[in-house]
Image (tube, rainbow, N blue to C red):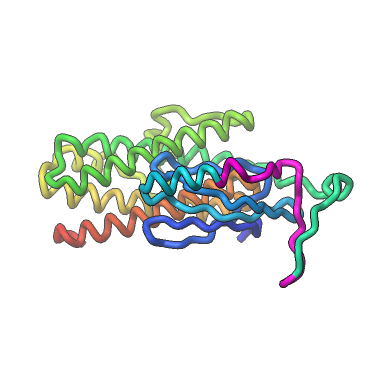
Amino acid sequence: MASRPTGQHTCLRSGLAEEIDFGYGDQIVFSSRRRVLAAVAATAAVLGVGSFAVLRATGDRADERAANQVVQSAPPTANQVVQPGAPGQAGRTLSPAEQSQLPPPPAHTPADAQFMQRMISHHRQALEMTALVADRAAGPEVSLLARRIETSQRDEITQMERWLTERGEEVSGPHAHHTGHDAAMPGILSPEQLSQLERARGAEFDRLFLDLMIRHHNGALTMVQQLYAAGGGLEPASDRFAREVNADQGIEIRSMQELLATLGGG
């Protein structure tokens, strides 16, 4: 298993606190269904690693405006690198000469590119599945869940395509998951399973959709594990994205399992 950067930020999502590592100097990207309230003004970084906290919005507009004021009033830190002190001691701002000696963040690898390309294909099949919900689902809960999945997966596809384009890597075509190579990806539905889902209606559709989407999401988690096992995920941006996928889809799996249990299918 490859080693991973040690910087951290804390996300509070759906009442669950999670520690997610990321590399210093990369833009933080969150899916469109998550609204970020505030970033703590003090950003520390040592040897290319940074640390700060992020809070998820609760829907209170007053809180959001206050948070925006905090962010806007924070001093710029783009050219400032702070070395944290020992416990109980203040940190120290590194000089430009000291900063110039810091190693650059790790570059992306073929494993990173392949992960992004294959995950795009994986996400596109999830969109095929959610497109069936509107005229087949029996309950509003499944429809709402499908809309949430669709929103996040579309946003993540855009992020992955941008990541690949910026690094001069090939962007997967819209039908890449139909090829024999990508059919072997973890969690990918077979043509027969997709046809079965297309034929289902009402409560039968709801249960089958949840069951297949849980499998599909679990496949994405396996792909994240495969990324790190192949030595990828050292580049800060790819590591951050993989961890976001792992966290988000893990939360959605638990939601789907709970919903499936209420429908008598879990």
216 relative position to 70: left or right = left
Residue 7 drawn above or below residue 209? below
Considering the image in quadrants, where does the N terminus appear?
bottom right
Residue 40 drawn above or below residue 113? below
Q: Residue at x 14, y 39 (%)?
A: 136
Magenta-drawn stretch, dominant element (helix, strand or loop): loop
Q: Residue at x 52, y 29 (%)?
A: 171
Q: Residue at x 47, y 47 (%)?
A: 37
Q: Residue at x 15, y 42 (%)?
A: 137
45 relative position to 192: left or right = right
Q: Nearer the viewer, residue 199 or 69?
A: 69
Where residue 24 sits: x, y (%)?
A: 67, 48
Residue 248 drawn above or below residue 159? below
Considering the image in quadrants, where does the C terminus appear?
bottom left
Where residue 85 sits: x, y (%)?
A: 76, 65
168 relative position to 97: left or right = left
Q: Which residues are magenta?
A: 70-88
Q: Nearer the viewer, residue 40 or 223?
A: 40
Residue 33 drawn above or below residue 173? below
Where residue 54 sits: x, y (%)?
A: 52, 52
The residue sitting at the bottom extreme is: 87
Is 140 magenta? The answer is: no
Where residue 32 sits: x, y (%)?
A: 42, 39
